[in-house]
Amino acid sequence: KAKEKSCCSYVIFDRQEHPKDQSHIAIEPELINAIRRNEFELFYQPRIDIASGNIIGAEGLIRWRHPEKGLIYPDAFIPTAERTGLIVPIGYWVIQQAGQDLQRIAASGLSIERLSVNLSFRQFQDSYLCRTIQRLINKYTIDTSILEFELTESALFNNEVHVQEGIEELHTLGINFSLDDFGTGYSSFSLLQKLPISSLKIDRSFVSGVMTNTDDREIVKALIRLAHSLNKEIIAEGVETKQQLNFLSRYGCHQAQGYLYSKPIPYEEFVYLLEHGYQLKEESAATQ
Ligand code: C2E
Ligand code: MG
Ligand code: MG
Ligand code: MG
């Protein structure tokens, strides 16, 4: 009973839940091999403070270095990992890799304010989630004020009490939370206010339309205003042009991520950017 009350109560995986994902089922055994053979890599996409232009941190994004097929992107295997529950060990790999890299960043005399990784709601179904994360925090002496978990609206607002309890407990460890792909799902504003979510990430689909689509422009303005009034940090994803950046800046968006600054890159390249800075895509193109 006490165990059920604690951090993350256990729920049995329902394999029938997402029949439309069946096409991915063939890669399940390969995914198990990938975990055993340690074929994953964590790439980093810089997160920029719009006002200063400084890199304040990064989002860690998983890639699978397949021995024959080459680099495989998360959209091709995360749905299978979620459906089968393999996202639990994969998710721990991501957090331990982020912890290890944070340690290396500190050891090279550099510092970042924020490092986020994506957390799938399925990971909350592991009753050891909080204990395991606590263990990783201790192992890599992770400063939890730097660590952020990105969650999607569906994970947060489909009334899964154990997810909300898990968030609360992880928050007591000092971990930050952000709402990913904001605007694409259903948000409960009262819950958004109640849960310890410090930042909102505007989905790329809206950002990409701000210069061409009136609806997208109004939605982005409304999302920024909402973040301001809820007193939350607001981050734009998928910023690709200087015009989009100027628009976001004008309406008070705090941070940005996107190809304008950098694609997700391997750890070594990210550290290089931390040391030497970046060049805006268009500016670098103009000087060529
Ligand atoms: P996300 O968390 O919303 O990540 C943003 C995605 O947008 C990334 O795709 C990133 O490469 C891409 N992106 C960023 N800036 C731009 C841009 O300017 N233009 C364009 N066209 N794309 C941009 P990626 O790395 O393929 O990841 C896709 C999704 O897979 C992520 O969406 C996230 O939901 C999921 N994912 C990635 N890594 C993990 C992980 O470690 N665990 C879990 N559970 N999910 C992950
Ligand atoms: Mg994300
Ligand atoms: Mg996103
Ligand atoms: Mg996304």
Image (spheres, rainbow, N blue to C red):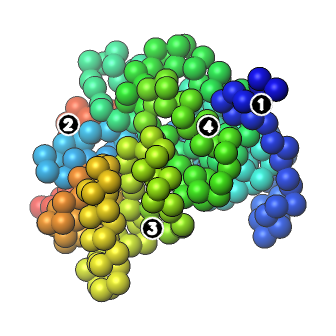
Q: Alpha-carbon distance for marks 4 and 2?
A: 41 Å
- Residue 4 is labelled as 1
Q: Nearer the viewer, mark 1 or mark 3?
A: 1
Looking at the figure, which quarter contains the C terminus? bottom left
- For label 2, the crowd category at 10 Å Cα-Cα, with few meaning under 14, some 14 to 19 and many 20 or more, is few
Report if the beta carbon of the residue with label 1 is closer than 8 angstroms to ligand 1: no
| Residue behind mark 4 | 165
Q: Nearer the viewer, residue 108 or 133?
A: 133
Report the amino acid beneath label 3: Gly
Vertical arrangement, residue 211 with respect to residue 264, above or below: below
Q: Earlier in the sequence, mark 4 or mark 3?
A: 4
- For label 4, the crowd category at 10 Å Cα-Cα, with few meaning under 14, some 14 to 19 and many 20 or more, is some
Query: Measured from the top left, where is residue 205 in percent x and y?
Result: 43, 72
Vertical arrangement, residue 242 with respect to residue 166, above or below: below
| Residue behind mark 2 | 276
Dot 2 falls on a residue whose secondary structure is helix
Question: Residue 154, located in which quarter of the rendered image?
Answer: bottom right
- Residue 183 is labelled as 3
Report the amino acid beneath label 1: Glu
Q: Alpha-carbon distance for marks 4 and 1?
A: 11 Å
Q: Alpha-carbon distance for marks 1 and 3?
A: 32 Å
- For label 1, the crowd category at 10 Å Cα-Cα, with few meaning under 14, some 14 to 19 and many 20 or more, is few
Report the amino acid beneath label 4: Glu
Report if the beta carbon of the residue with label 4 is closer than 8 angstroms to ligand 1: no
- For label 3, the crowd category at 10 Å Cα-Cα, with few meaning under 14, some 14 to 19 and many 20 or more, is many
Q: Are marks 1 and 2 in contact (CB under 8 Å)?
A: no
Dot 1 falls on a residue whose secondary structure is helix
